[in-house]
Image: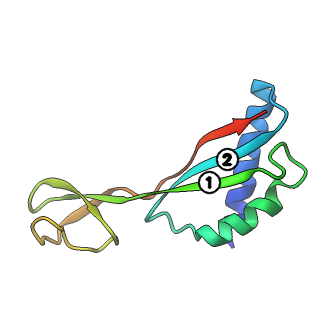
Amino acid sequence: MHEMSLCQSIREVIEDRARADGFAAVKTVRLEIGRFSCVEKQALEFAFDAAMRGSVADGARLEIRDLPGRAMCYDCMKEVEIDERFSPCPLCGGTMLMPVAGDEMRIKNLEVI
């Protein structure tokens, strides 16, 4: 399960920020996860609690915001939102699409004490 290693990386980022900014605890961690990121959100939520034990984020609430998939359609030259990587363009039905967003996963912000 790569979600555990993702959570361990999130923990490292949080611990680094805590040292740099001097906060003692994290109440909420807000993540943004793209539709094409291949992150299983339920597995991430499960792994999050385990990975944060003993850290400044122990007991923190995890909030996840889903980001849409976006692609450039080379048939109609428009940027469009798509549900799946190989979906046709919702505007023209074209199939020459290049994903431009939806692979990302980032910590949007932390609510700290």
**Residue 8 relative to residue 24: left or right:** left
Dot 1 alpha-carbon crowd within 10 angstroms: few under 14, some 14 to 19, many 20 or more: few
**Residue 79 relative to residue 47: left or right:** left
The amino acid type, in three-letter code, at marker 2 is Val
The x, y position of residue 45, in whole percent, is 68, 65
| Residue at 48% across, 53% down | 104
Q: Nearer the viewer, residue 68 or 20?
A: 68
Q: Nearer the viewer, residue 56 or 8?
A: 56
Q: Are marks 1 and 2 in contact (CB under 8 Å)?
A: yes
The x, y position of residue 6, in whole percent, is 67, 58
Residue 93, picture quadrant:
bottom left
State the residue position of label 2: 29
| Residue at 58% across, 50% down | 31
| Residue at 75% across, 43% down | 27
The x, y position of residue 52, in whole percent, is 81, 54
Q: Secondary structure at mark 2?
A: strand
State the residue position of label 1: 63
The x, y position of residue 22, in whole percent, is 81, 25
Q: Earlier in the sequence, mark 1 or mark 2?
A: 2
